Image: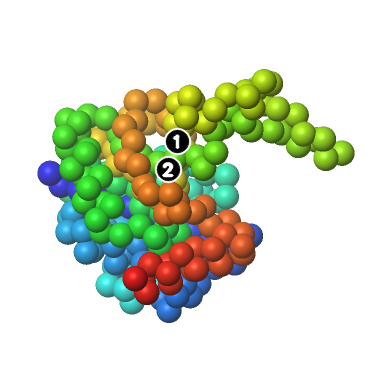
Amino acid sequence: MKRLAIIPARGGSKRIPNKNVRDFCGKPMIAHVLGAAAASGLFDTVHVSTESPDISAVAAACGFPPDFPRPDNLADDMTPIMPVLRYVTEEYARRGRDFDEIWLLMACAPLIDAQDLTKAAVLFTASGGGQPLLAVSEYQAPIEWAFSRQPDGRLVPVQAGMFAVRSQDLEKKYFDAGSFAAFPAARVLNAEGAGSDDGFIGYVLPKGTAIDIDEEQDWKQAEAIFRARAAQ
């Protein structure tokens, strides 16, 4: 099976400036996922999809110079991920390079290691390779206990009365860990718009591995976990 790993890494991050290449525990953030991809031995090609010359330079310094840039019309903060995956896959096809599997690796997922990727690949293959795979993690508390918070601070239960149900009596629920996904190539090439969230199989990441790094507090939490793991 020929596998293509695509790491979307556009410039212009607003909440954490330059977060894809900012130093994270001694390396540019993107270097961690590039290292995991390389160590896994899974991928025939690892492509950093970016419109930014600075990010391209960092990727090249890590040993992964992008084969081509991302078009500016796919680099704004409103563009979904799937059109980016499709563009990259089609561009490689135009260059005579076809792949069976398209993997999405998120640039800001430094807690993912090679073992996560190889185990996910085993699950993907065992399922027949016809369904996409998504890295997920379990909610820390039952979502049935969730509240919405009104502007005046008042809490409104999302599912009234569910507070009385014991957690062990509720089915576990999972969320997109924002780390990686794997697709049959046809799923990407035939995708329309943002694609679909239907038909995925889930690779469950350990709690604490899935951190969506969007704010400084998230960054500090991820660094603390990374350092604790490195010290073990």
Q: Quadrant of the C terminus?
A: bottom left
Query: Residue flagged by tag 2: what amino acid is it?
Result: Ser
CB of mark 2 within 8 Å of CB of mark 1? yes
The residue that appears at 32% across and 40% down in the rendered structure is: 203
Q: Element type at marker 1?
A: strand
What residue do we see at 58% from left, 27% from top? Answer: 144
Instruction: Determine whether the residue tagged by mark 2 lies in a helix, strand or loop.
Output: strand
Q: Residue furthest bottom?
A: 26
Q: Which callout, 2 or 1, points at the residue further toward the start of the chain?
A: 2
Q: Which residue is mark 1?
A: 174
Q: Nearer the viewer, residue 49 or 215?
A: 215
Q: What is the x, y in percent for residue 182?
A: 29, 42
Q: Is residue 159 left or right of residue 132?
A: right
Q: Is residue 67 above or below residue 130?
A: below
**Residue most toward the left?**
1
Q: Which residue is mark 2?
A: 137
